[in-house]
Amino acid sequence: MPRRMILTDAERQSFLALPADDDTLIRHWSLNDEDQRLLETRRRDDTRLGLALQLCALRYPGRLIQRGEVIPESALAFLAEQLSIEPEALASFARRTPTRYEQLAILRQHYGFTELSHPLRADLLAFARGVAIASTKDKFVVTALADEMRRRRIVIPGITVIERLAGQACTEAEEALFADVAARLPPDLVVRMEALLGMGPRIRQSGISWLREPPGKAGEAAMRGLIDRLEAVRHVGLSNNVLQVVPAHRVRRMAQEGRRLTAQNFEQMRSGRRYATLVAFLLEMEIALTDAAIGMFEVLIGKSFRRAEAERDRQLLENASSATSALDFFVSFGEAISTKRETGLSLDEAVNAVSSWDQLMQATAAAKAASRTRKDDDLIAYLPAQYARIRRFSAPFLTAFTFEGNRQNRDFIGIVMQMKVAGKGRRRSTNPPWIANARDLVDKRWIKIILAADGSIDQRMLELFIIVELKNRIAANEIWIKGSRTYRALDEDMISHQTYAIIKAEARIPVAIPIDVEIYLAQKAEALDQKLREAANRLETGRGDTRIGAKGLRVPAVKTAETEAALAFAKRVAAAMPPIRLTDLVADIDRMTGFSSLFEHLQTGRTPNDMRVFYAALIAEATNLGFSKMALACPGITRRQLQQMAIWHFREETFTLALAKLVEAQHAAPFAAVFGSHTVSSSDGQHIHLGDGGEVAGGVNGHYGTNPIIKLYTAISGRYAPFHTKIIAATASEAVHVLDALLETDAGLNIVRHHVDGGGVSDLVFAFCHALGFAFVPRIPDLDGRCLYGFRPAKQYGILQNVMGDRIDADLIRVHWDDILRLMTSLQTRTVSASLMLKRLSATTRQSGLAQALRHMGRIERTLFTLDWINDEDLRKTTTAELNKGESRNSLVRAVNLHRLGRFRDRSQENLSIRASALNLIVTAIIHWNTIYTGRVVDVLRNTGQPVAEPLLASLSPLSWEHVNLTGDYLWEEKPALDDTGFRPVSFTL
């Protein structure tokens, strides 16, 4: 069996190195009374020190001191101090070989240290196999094995022995798991799985490749394609029980591996591993295809309403001309008939004198036709034209899924099931039995269109109602779909009731609000009443810059401007930045932080073996150049090398870890403190246009034109570190995604205050942030129409009563308080993502009691914040300054994403996510490099006697890129020209 490589060369060098830092020395090299008594039996200082050194080395790192080995000065001094001996005494130790071996024998006899024998090796191998099964990384097995040998006082012969033993344990553990999975698979199921590795008769590609294809542009064909692939996976007949013996993290890893392997790769595997990987991949694909189909169903319903809106607008435009003509006719007719009537003519004579009754009837008919179409018409009246299209995608959707729900939705689900059965035939039956049952479920908005004047029912409109209502109830989480991850019951996503009960009993609920609802309500009622009265008094007396008008509160816009001195200073510093190629900048940052070591190979866990290929692949993704053109721009690198690097090393989790590494480095940089606080952050969305085949992955947002786009929603700290980025849909609410950045970052941040622009604001976000301990500080550009809320009647607040909304429902909050605490606990423990919960709770058609209670909590926090906002001009300025950091970063993103007109062309969400992550990582690297060298430029200025005022430093930003060569041939310096401090020299004309 080939040796399994686990550690890098650098890790092997350091793994069993003698400790040098104070914490490790204190923990492992502190001598106890027993040690001191043994050492006192030695007469000479050098032998006492040598014996102590060997004793501590056997304890940690667990090995023998090698002849001629250099002992760290700090370690030697630490031992010598405990023995009251000069460190130089070690120089004469063990010059005589027998003395050295005698001391080793003493330590073995006195402390029970033993050599690694074959029986012990077998015991350790069994121990390591158990660790390997549960471990997420092979390196953890090496560490656990070394710790176990230290605990059992087994002398570690060398790092290669441990690595070989750990590698064998990992391999045997995997093979045992794979064999167990294979044994659970019936032969016919194995045959069906193996068939997916062959070429399909119609698809002209392997079944595995076909299953992984992106769905394409949302439409009837794409929906059928998703359903076909889902049915193909279901046909295999897999059950989740097959993988119940495999830890969840291994299942995820095997599923990720399956998404990257070709059919040929699968066929080259051993059968056990092939079957286990296929099972994990297919089970994950079943969930992914289910969620994709439901998501597309929602999108297609939305598109149908947009088509109905377009038809209404078309009719408005078409009728506008005839309506204008009719209006002109009636104006002329009215004036003329009034004149004729004054002469004493009868009405009939007056009409015939200026026109004719036929012309009058024609004009009336034209005006009547035009009046039927109005801008505020309900769009459902225009849906019948979309019936055929809706039926084409809804019929296979209904057939493919099983719907579940609470008791209130059982009747509706029954109607859906009856409609599904009735719709399986080629011909649509007239007056099927489900129609009579469905009539009672129709709301007032639809019934006037579904029910004709004679009492008959429009079956098509009733079907449309059921389909649209199904979509709404799925979005509101009233109906769940079996086999889905995103659209399952809300209760299943949260932490279990049993676990929550334990946390509650131990008083460990991780929230920032009182656990007692009465204390919470009392505090909020008092705070609201006090601030509302203070605000009313300020407005009545005319203090401050906020005024109240007919439309509500009005706050003047914040104006910010930099002084000429600040601009000149920033320009001078920017001109002094060392010029550098992007390739060398990335290599510099890697040398400083080691972020590349976190891009481990999916299968082997090894770090990238060719750094030039790694850097080139990363830059190709970030700059949107693509692998083919990058291969042409990098001598000696091929497109296949770049592809292999990306396939096996570029994953969401590797980018997350690497980004966290850079963010931590940025926050630790001394000069970064000039830019702001590391406990403050902001987030904003940036649209990215899509090109070529990539359009199918995006959508149209009217604010950004008619071309398909996606949004990159990014959070940036007060020190310019973009610590989180994700792709969201073109029309998605930014408010839904605000909290993901704060709760899911691995950068070890302690964010206290978070800023967003107007698009990231909602009552639910206010509630979530307050309960989780974040100060939510949005920029509110316009308060027109915004209400304030309180527990008491509005008339108690004088001038504010006209902008007061409904009273806070304290009883509603009481009823759902325990569910609120359980939800927040689920978010803090990362049991479920905040964006998923916010999306479900934000459903506009209907809201659960929990959502309504949270909305009332949000109104409390929104009101308290609004009162601070209108009274505190400094708060408005600070918020604007923080948000400007993110907006300025967007310019750097556009500069780096320069190739292919800055348009992403990836068709799958996974590839889009990788490209966005690479772009953010390179942008963060530039920011960190700029921070370091901006600080060095300022140091040079100060060291040469140039005055640098603190206010001028605040005007600096690490977002410039004029000194960075982003294009051209992508080459790397063989040996960077660094100064004595290890940095590039800074020079400029003083």
Image (tube, grey):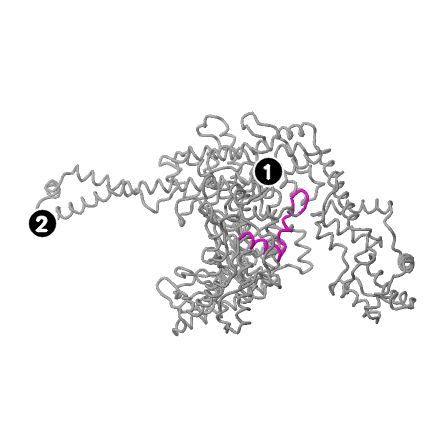
Residue 526 vertical position relative to residue 178 in the rendered view, above or below: below
Q: CA distance from mark 1 to mark 2?
A: 83 Å
Q: Camera-side residue: 164 or 492?
A: 164
Q: Secondary structure at mark 1?
A: helix
Give residue 263's position: percent from left, percent from top. 62, 32
Secondary structure, magenta segment, majority class: helix
- Using the rendered image of the protein, determine whether residue 502 is visible from the camera's viewpoint: yes
- Mark 2, residues whose alpha carbon is within 10 Å: few (<14), some, or many (≥20)? few
| Front: mark 1 or 2 | 1
Q: Circle 1 is placed at which residue position?
A: 285
Residue 542: % across, % down = 38, 73
In the rendered view, does 97 fall on the left or right side of 677?
Answer: right
- Please name the residue that numbered disc 2 is placed on: 342
Q: Can you tell which quarter of the image residue 431 is in? A: top left
Vertical arrangement, residue 177 with respect to residue 559, above or below: above
Residue in the picture at 46% in, 41% down: 695
Looking at the rendered image, the quarter that the N terminus falls into is top right
Three-letter code for the amino acid on which mark 2 is drawn: Glu
Q: Quadrant of residue 772?
A: bottom right
Q: Which residues are magenta?
A: 582-606
Residue 120, compared with residue 540, is above or below; it is: above
